[in-house]
Amino acid sequence: MNFLATLLIALKALRVNKLRSALTMLGIIIGVAAVIIMIAVGSGARAQVEAQIRSLGANLMMVFSASPTFTGARAAAGATHTISEDDAYAIARELPEYVASAAPSLRGSGQIVAGNSNWSTTFYGVTPDYFDVREWGLAEGRFFEPAEINGAAKVAIIGRTVATNLFGDESPIDQTVRIRTVPLTVIGVLAAKGQSPGGSDLDDVLLMPITTARNRILGATALAKSRSVGSIQIKLRDGADSKAAEERVRELLRQRHRLQPGQDDDFMLRNMTEILQTREESSRVMALLLASVASVSLLVGGIGIMNIMLVSVTERTREIGLRRAVGARARDILQQFLIEAITLSLIGGLIGVALGIGGAQLIGQLAGWPIELSVTAILLAVSFAAAIGIFFGYYPARQAARMSPIEALRHE
Amino acid sequence: MTAPLIRVDNLAKHYQLGDTDVPALRGVSLEIARGSFVAVMGPSGSGKSTFMNLLGCLDLPSGGRYWLAGEEVSSLSDDALAALRNRRIGFVFQHFNLLPRTSALDNVALPLLYRGQTADERRAHAAQRLCQVGLGERMDHHPAQLSGGQQQRVAIARALVGDPALVLADEPTGALDSRTGIEIMAVLQQLNREGLTVVVVTHERDIAAYTDRIIQFRDGLVVADLVNERRDAEADLAELAAR
């Protein structure tokens, strides 16, 4: 007996009991759709985290100024400047086995004016290492030259958001912007980076030589003297153990700041890579958890199929007897009912895929979550559905095949 | 003399009911020639159904031997028995056993499905057989749209579709009124005249009267095996119509 004929018999049997077939499929439909949606949402979330890691620059570690506790109260990180530019150079110099480069930066914010337009943004005084550490390229223009850093040149590189808001479609290169009355010539525009892990716009930024920021804009003499900075961003070498690197940086800074054992750090270390990896890990666990909950519903759907197939076998006992009498072998009967179960679960699976894809996209739009549909997940869900059909269809089909033709014919 | 279509030698069948061994058939030996029209009679529990199941290759004997068309059946595998039923035997049942919500044509074609014929071949053969039993006009009808007599004709067409050597009819008139019953017997007589071997199980003398030979079962044994002067079913129908 050929496969196509069996398939047609199965489809016909399913058509005869339309409502029952639909209800039986429902379990599989919901299960497959849920698996696909969960995996889409889960891997979307993971892809987002991965993109954030890339936006920060790989293997990033940050040091912020922090005031030592005096009375138990602690000032906000970066509010006082306890770390210096020289700390950054020391980190790069003393720990070459861990550190690829270390970039000190000063942070400020203010109104930027260009012609009639103005825009409030954050600006940073940086060294050329900054671009390396953040793995940040230019969309147009050029980087700072060493002479410009040393000479506190009045030049700036601006982020995409700033460029758009101040200059629209015009090229900002060689245009002049003012911050606190200081005119700066724009020499470059940063490549767009998008959102930070915290959700802020990374492209809403203006960069200038660290000396320019310190001497001309922030202008605090105390700052100038101590060469202190708000933060140091450290890029670790590829494959460097970030935990060990964190310890070494901490040791070095405590030593340079002459902190006694037992005394609190006067700086804060943030191992960004680690934080993001933890987030990635937790989103992976979450996705796995959701997918397994969805699989349970697939399993329940499978049990539903087995239930209905058992009922169907009992109902069609005489049909089985008749088929056996006119020459069907036990294996023909087994095949017939097995194919019926698989057809049921596969059709359910395909409907589930359609609903899952639609549902994932709907959720992505309504909730604004990133969605990543993967072909692997879809194939996996469909083959899982087929496997469930085989697994839960086998027992009823075997019951049917093992019936004695005589008793089956005599069945009322 | 040609070899008989059916030869059974000391055929026995026992059923195990709990601890007790129940003999249903206790040694039956007989032959049925090709082209005969035989009735098997007996009260319930006489072993006639068991005998029919064995003749139909639906079951294997516990003792004795059975040759169908010269082929020893007693020791065949389940699959071989299925193949034998498909090729050699056509069944007609008391309750027709047609597939519901399935056209007469597809019902008749069913046995050919297990022969690996293509859909076109199956339909062609089935259509031919339906015409033979006078239902050429009703091929697309479902069983529910047919009368009892028509349903039984569809069942007979199904029994014929595989060109069997033997048609086994188990109480073929049991679910029909007497006039329709005679009509069915007329169809079987006509097929028999064309050379088909037909064995009918019945408990009605009136029905057995349309056959050439009546085999009586009681307590698992053959108690009588008589030649019968067959009544002509067509003549009886004509008489009924004239009345």
Image (cartoon, grey):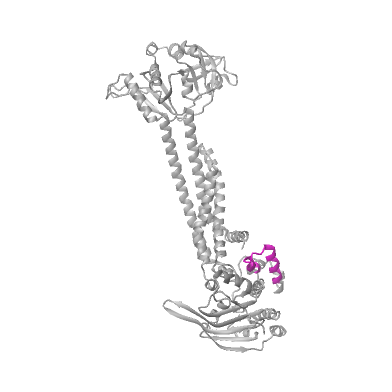
Q: Which of the pair A169/A238 is nearer the observer? A: A238
Look at 34% across and 24% down and name the residue there: A250
Q: Is residue A350 left or right of residue A240?
A: right
Q: Quadrant of residue B121?
A: bottom right
Q: Position of residue A277 (x, y in %)?
A: 43, 34
- Chief secondary structure of the magenta portion: helix
Q: Is residue B130 left or right of residue A211?
A: right
Query: Residue A293, position in %: x, y?
Result: 45, 48
Q: Quadrant of the N terminus of chain A?
A: bottom right
Please state the horizontal and vertical placement of residue A44, each as a whole percent of the image. Answer: 50, 38
Image position of B155 with respect to B237: above or below: above
Residue B142 in sight: no
A4 or A315: nearer the eye?
A4
Please provide the residue range marked out in magenta. B108-130
Side of A269 relative to A52 (left or right): left
**For the image shown, how many numbered marks are present on the structure?**
0
